[in-house]
Image (cartoon, rainbow, N blue to C red):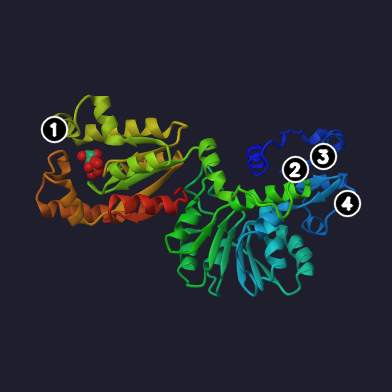
Amino acid sequence: MSPEIHALIKPGVDYDLLEIAPDDLATRLPKLLTEYDGLNVTIPYKEKVQDYLSIISEEAAQVGAVNTIYGGQGFNTDLYGFKRLDFDYKGKTVLILGSGGVAKTMLYSVGSLGAAHVIMRVRDKQKTQPLVSRFVAYFPHCEISLINDDELSKWNDPIHYILNGTPLGMWPKVNCLPLDENSYLKLLESGHIEAVFDSIYNPLSTRFLLLARQKQIEAVNGLQMLFYQALEAQIIWGNVLENDVYDAKPDDLTQLLLSKFPIKLVLSGFMASGKTTIAREIAKRIKLKFIDLDFEIEQAENSSIAQIFKTSGEAYFRQKEAEVLARFMHGEESFVLATGGGTLLQAKNLECVRQNSGQIIYLDVSLNEAIRRAGDRSSRPLLQAPDEVIKELYEARQEKYHAIADCVINADLTPARVVDSILNLFLLG
Ligand code: S3P
């Protein structure tokens, strides 16, 4: 995405992407240093590139990574991108997930911004220990602890910020969390968390961020860091002045991301919870394809849902439902898809959605409201039953809907408000 981001910050700028094989670095880099005014360096060369530079900024040297070069000098603008987050770490406890390059940048930044205690959740403590010993010397006021998942699950002292520096939750594995779900929920419910940050920006709202936002906790994605590290590189290269007024802002990258990477929003919920209406409106608002699963089944079978149930039975309907769902989920295209009320309660359908990067939004409607909206119920075979039977079905499904959802939305509200809450939650508004 870098060429597009730089073009957004500084229209007309020339920014080429060059791939260099590890064996060619020693011969190609010195030439590039003379051919180009400025360079960005990315994984896996942020450390190695230091060997070819005569001067390295103090911060970049201390972090041990360079991502921007100008006039033979090395800088680290990732640090700047991360520091632009509006978080006040002074005297606070920060949990960093991961121990790779991003986590290292986070550790250095929060240490220099006055955190009292940084807890790093790592897989291999021994491997990370040398890094900690080195950083402790730069920030003597800051205690640094290394813990594993098990220790995190038993952690009881206040933690104020959680920063994800791992790639867990990144497309296509959007259902992954970077830490154990129960440990995370316990922290989010502790009353101490002030904000969480995810270095991931694809998807824009990871499951990690959605869980926090639903608990009214500030949850920031990696777009800001991405945007500001590029802006700082342009300042270093002299293309943009520090005090320039920029029209561009991190949110401008949202459309760019949507055009480059797929997003698959899957709406679930009881019959008449509003799945079709809401999915259609969201698709319209963010200009994505809208899919109504029941409609697609009717098209494929050339028959109404009620008729399919009547002539071929529910088992046949479920089979067709699974086939049509799989067809869409396996595609590469972005969409907003309205499922049928029973679709995701079938294990294989849920698996298919999860395996293919669907993000599940549960429209939580009350039974009374669903029945009111369903009107004469004639088009819904499963609603052709006495109220007690429908109530039983509703109650049996409630718990499952909650358990499988990435986020839960109050669907008793008007469609316009439901649409707004979803777009706000996903930062797509
Ligand atoms: C069903 C819900 C219906 C339809 C079919 C089965 C269910 O869709 O797929 O009648 O099992 O809940 P809606 O939820 O759109 O009514």
Q: Residue at position x 42%, y 37% from top? A: 287
Three-letter code for the amino acid on which mark 3 is drawn = Asp
**10 Å crowding of disc 3: few (<14), some (14-19), many (20+):** few
Q: Nearer the viewer, mark 4 or mark 1?
A: 4
Three-letter code for the amino acid on which mark 4 is drawn = Ile
Q: Quadrant of ligand 1?
A: top left
Three-letter code for the amino acid on which mark 2 is drawn = Asn
**10 Å crowding of disc 1: few (<14), some (14-19), many (20+):** few
**10 Å crowding of disc 2: few (<14), some (14-19), many (20+):** many
Q: Residue at position x 54%, y 64% from top? A: 195
Disc 1 on helix, strand or loop? helix
The mark nearer the N terminus, 4 or 1, is 4
- The residue to which callout 3 is attached is 37
The mark nearer the N terminus, 1 or 3, is 3
206 lies above or below 156: above
The mark nearer the N terminus, 4 or 2, is 2
- The residue to which callout 4 is attached is 55
- The residue to which callout 2 is attached is 40
Q: In 3D space, how far apart are the residues under numbered discs 1 and 3 (Cα atoms)?
A: 72 Å
Residue 322 relative to residue 218: left or right = left
Q: Residue at position x 34%, y 42% from top? A: 281
Q: Nearer the viewer, mark 4 or mark 3?
A: 3
Q: In 3D space, how far apart are the residues under numbered discs 4 and 2 (Cα atoms)?
A: 16 Å
Residue 5 relative to residue 379: left or right = right
298 lies above or below 149: above
341 lies above or below 114: above
Q: In 3D space, how far apart are the residues under numbered discs 4 and 1 (Cα atoms)?
A: 77 Å
Q: Nearer the viewer, mark 3 or mark 2?
A: 3
